[in-house]
Amino acid sequence: MCFSVMIERDLSKLARLYQASINEQAFEYFYQRTQSHPDVYKMPTEDGRIYAKSWAPIITFVRGKRELRPMRYQLLPSFCEGQKYTRVNPKTGKDIEIKSTYNARLDSLFKARAWQKPFMNFHGIVPVTSFFEWVDHQGKSTQIEFTDPDKEILHVPCLYDNWYSQDKSLVIQSFAIITTDPTKEVLEKGHDRSPINLDENEIQTWLDPKNSDQTTILDCLKKPLKNVFQGEFL
């Protein structure tokens, strides 16, 4: 699982790189909600690191054009009644939160209920500069940061969904990073997953799934990772 990633926060830079417009209205809504709902709308760290339930700029393809808009890391499915995705604990009969929806395994896109609506409908790109994992190092659980020295930004595909409160006064757009089998370097460091990194010529295919079929989209995601990630223990 990819529990945390470092993102590029410079919107102007991202707009140029992805030839995308900045959805000023969406960012204004987000900044207002960081004041009125700080428990729901959390900023990234100063250096651009995000954890579950913090927000990041995401590249989408809406109404025939690419645009940047803020979304929360940890997908909240639109079918949820409240602001948490829950299930009933069979032992206690009480609701418990499902917290693992910040990552979507490639082999579960058709299986897990949370991904069934977003897949082939709501696709985005997360501009990632590095990602972090917990691994066993010398008998201790240790964080490691993975980077690609040849690429400043990784084009990491994500699924997103749109959740609305019952009175429509609050909207949470949220996303999950898609992960796959690890590269050789990540596996050697002791972790069993890697975020997918799309080639530049595959970005538009991924962002506009309605112009493709499932086979084309899955082939795009299943291409072997070409990255040579370097891992540094923190």
Image (spheres, rainbow, N blue to C red):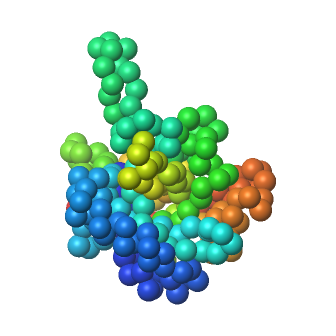
- Residue 158 position, x and y percent, is 53, 57
The part of the image, by quadrant, that contains residue 64 is bottom right
The part of the image, by quadrant, that contains residue 95 is top left
Q: Image point 50% across, 83% down: which residue?
A: 15
Q: Is 166 in front, or is 171?
A: 166
Q: Image point 57% across, 67% down: which residue?
A: 60
Q: How many marks?
A: 0
Q: Is 71 in front, or is 99?
A: 71
- Residue 194 position, x and y percent, is 48, 54
Q: Is 3 in front, or is 89?
A: 89
Mark yes or no: residue 132 visible.
no
Q: Using the image, determine if residue 181 lies above or below residue 114.
A: below
> Left or right: 136 with respect to 146?
left
> Left or right: 230 with respect to 151?
left
Image quarter where the C terminus lies is bottom left
Mark yes or no: residue 166 visible.
yes
Q: Image point 44% across, 73% down: which residue?
A: 25
Q: Image point 40% across, 49% down: which residue?
A: 74
- Residue 10 position, x and y percent, is 38, 81
Q: Using the image, determine if residue 51 lies above or below residue 13.
A: above
Residue lying at the far front in this picture: please name it: 167
- Residue 128 position, x and y percent, is 43, 68
